[in-house]
Amino acid sequence: MIATWLLAAAVSGSFVHPTPQLAAAVTGSFVHPTPQPAADLPAAVYKARRERVLEQLDGCVALVEAQGIIQGVTEDFRQDADFYWLSGLNEGDAYLLFQPKSPYRKVVLYLKPRDPEAERWTGPREPLSPALMAKYGVDRVQRGTPEKMLEDAAQHHDCITLITPSGMGDAERKDDALMLRLASRNGLKINYQRGLLARLRSAHAPEEIERMQRAIAITALGHDTVAKATVEGVSERDVQAQLEYTFFANGATGLSYSSLIGTGPNGTVLHLDQNTRSRILRKGDLVVVDAAGEYGRYAADVTRTYPVSGHFTPEQAKVYQAVFQAQEDIFAAIRPGVSMAELQHVAEGSLRRTGYLADFIHSFGHFVGLDVHDAGDLEAPIPVGAVFTVEPGVYLPQQGFGIRLEDEVLMTEHGFQLLTATIPRKLEDVESWVARMRRASR
């Protein structure tokens, strides 16, 4: 296994812990990892996805605008999952136009105009060419916005279909606004299929599952690091640093979400603020670690609860067993045709029987894919190929600890596959795992 400690000398030298309470656990030269980045999915994958959309449009025009966000001083762009699933494009101000009745321009990709001055900051962008069209597997690539071609499409289609998720705020989506104006001006019928992309995306293809499995394998290595790092005298921030180094050292292409490390009473706060993670781990504490790596844009999501002393107290063990039993009850209920809503009912029933329902303050799980909280219908039967979490938890602020276990499962034709099976979750297995990892680090 690649070295999993962050605070080593940048090139060589001895490992030094950041806290005086700990002696050096590892010595020797720092190893520079050489993980392989995730290869781009072939254009044919995205083309096949768009063809599935075309088949569902009932001969109507549809338009999808990129909804990605820009973050940070360096203006890093992250595409929204719907547009990325349709195109593989990580660029803003882009549109995909679907014209089912066009013989040669069924799918047209619109990109923002080139700006040589901006490209000196952000890097050069490819010129329009047959090669660019082949790269994205579309019938045509244009620059600018699609208004002119939409008007042309109105002459050959008698309807539009709105397939983008409906907004929940005051900001209107540009794609919806363009399409509704087009329909009004040209007397086109309006169809609504707001759940189409969520339905198509929630059932993952083999190449998607493979990337999620890789993300989980990377995440498992990170939690190995946590098992040995959650010792008395270190800070939550130190645990986070070691964990995230392990993710990236083993090939993660990002974090699935901001790592959540809460020790003692902080473990009862679901989304602990990043700026408050300075608490020092103490003997007798439990540490809830909800953290996962991303691979090739696909997310993982795993939570484990670690005893700082290496063992759970009787009170902690009682709660842990209730959470574990809730997981087991949910697993037992996963079968073809079951819905997320039905599994939520099972989770609540399990924790009601053990007396902890009032301390279970969130849903049992969610879909996972291009987003860690991914698209999917909570009331409909879970489709084969969907990946979702099973994450019951009990939070007891007055007792000063919380416990959550979170695993990922893949829905299959006959039941499910536990994708996170290699990460210990039984109480006695967690204690043995922690002891084994800490011995290995001495």
Image: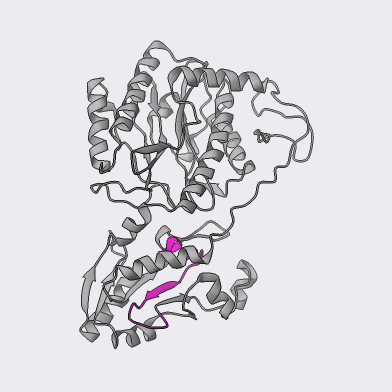
In the picture as drawn, the residue positioned furthest to the top comes out as: 314
Q: Does the magenta stretch include residue 286?
A: no
Residue 21 in view of the camera: no
Identify the image quadrant of the C terminus. Answer: top right
Q: What stretch is highlighted in magenta?
A: 83-105
Residue 87: horizontal and vertical position, in percent?
46, 66
Residue 86: horizontal and vertical position, in percent?
43, 64
Q: In this rendering, would 251 be left or right of 53?
A: right
In the picture as drawn, the residue positioned furthest to the front comes out as: 414
Residue 70: horizontal and vertical position, in percent?
49, 61
Q: Which of 368 and 287 is in front in this view?
A: 368
Identify the image quadrant of the N terminus. Answer: top right
Instruction: Identify whether 160 is placed above or below 435.
Output: below
Residue 247: horizontal and vertical position, in percent?
58, 40
Residue 392 in view of the camera: yes
- Residue sitting at 52 percent across and 16 percent down? 310
- Residue sitting at 58 percent across and 32 percent down? 238
Hey, which quadrant is residue 319 in on the image?
top left
Q: Does the magenta stretch include residue 101?
A: yes
Q: Main secondary structure of the magenta part?
A: loop
Q: Nearer the viewer, residue 77 or 276?
A: 77
- Residue sitting at 26 percent across and 26 percent down? 350
